[in-house]
Amino acid sequence: MNGYIHSIESFGSVDGPGIRFVVFTQGCPMRCLYCHNPDTWALNLGKQMSVDEILKAYEKNIPFYKNGGLTVSGGEPLVQIDFLIELFEAAKAKNIHTCLDTSGIIYNEKNAELMAKFDRLMKVTDLVMLDIKHIDPQEHVKLTKQSNTQILKFTRYLDSQDVDIWIRHVVVPTITDNEKYLFDLGYFIGDLKNLKALDVLPYHTMGREKYKELGMEYPLENLNDLDKEDAIEAKKHIIEGIKKRRSELEA
């Protein structure tokens, strides 16, 4: 089976544990205002690559991935879930650590056929890096043009499947840089038994040039980068929410 691939990074260092081979897939239903790769949105574009081609490319530098593995990002990898399943099953047959970097946006517990695919995928997924864009439902729609309902359900599903979870959250000035929203996010993830890490990332404006190249208007033109110190402070509020939730569970 072939997948539509946007690009590949041979030595990724921020896409899961260790040095990783990172496959960026094409296609995404989200329209995040701060997205720095809008060229990944369209479906059925990019270079078509087979599972064998990707794994052969991985194996060229396999000594470097001893403590790392394979990460599939996007775009949104789950829009090509059939390809993703085949790739991860083949990778696990070679004892490769698999990581899925996703928003979980296509999750739908009411679709039995889709859920069978999710169950199959989770059996060969070692880690999910889950990007929760905004904890507030209305604000999430403003930020991404999509509801967060299924994303939050997907979070619970991951925990029920005993899959390790890393939460990623981008702190955006005037949008997600809000003590209540940050605390609420922490409270929501505070009862995840498989929560292994929390990455709080400061918003940056590196996507502006990409938009200019594509002839697109950058939605957050008037926002400046978030200081790293502000991101550190934001993480404290999330951790407060985690601690609050865990203290309630222990009571």
Image (tube, rainbow, N blue to C red):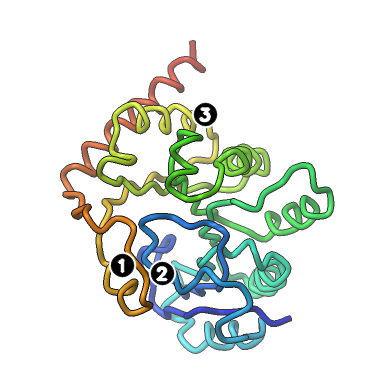
Residue pointed to by mark 2: 37
Amino acid type, label 2: Asn
Q: How many C-alpha atoms fall within 10 Å of the one at disc 1: few (<14), some, or many (≥20)?
A: some
Residue pointed to by mark 1: 207
Q: CA distance from mark 2 to mark 1?
A: 7 Å
User: Picture coordinates of residue 205 (x, y %)?
Assistant: 25, 62
Amino acid type, label 3: Asp
Find numbered disc 1 in the image and state the secondary structure of the residue it sits on.
helix
Q: How many C-alpha atoms fall within 10 Å of the one at disc 3: few (<14), some, or many (≥20)?
A: some
Residue pointed to by mark 3: 191
Rendered residue at 60%/38% (across/down): 149
Find numbered disc 2 in the image and state the secondary structure of the residue it sits on.
loop
Quadrant in the picture for residue 12 = bottom left
Location of the N terminus (image quadrant): bottom right
Question: As drawn, which residue projects farthest toward the right?
Answer: 112
Question: As drawn, which residue projects farthest toward the top?
Answer: 251
Mark whose residue sits in front, 3 or 1? 1
The numbered mark at residue 133 is none
Decide which of tag 2 and tag 1 comes sooner along the chain: 2
Decide which of tag 3 and tag 2 comes sooner along the chain: 2
Decide which of tag 3 and tag 1 comes sooner along the chain: 3
Residue closer to the observer: 112 or 71 = 112
Find numbered disc 3 in the image and state the secondary structure of the residue it sits on.
loop
- Tell whether 242 sits left or right of 48: left
Rendered residue at 29%/46% (across/down): 172
Residue closer to the observer: 107 or 18 = 107
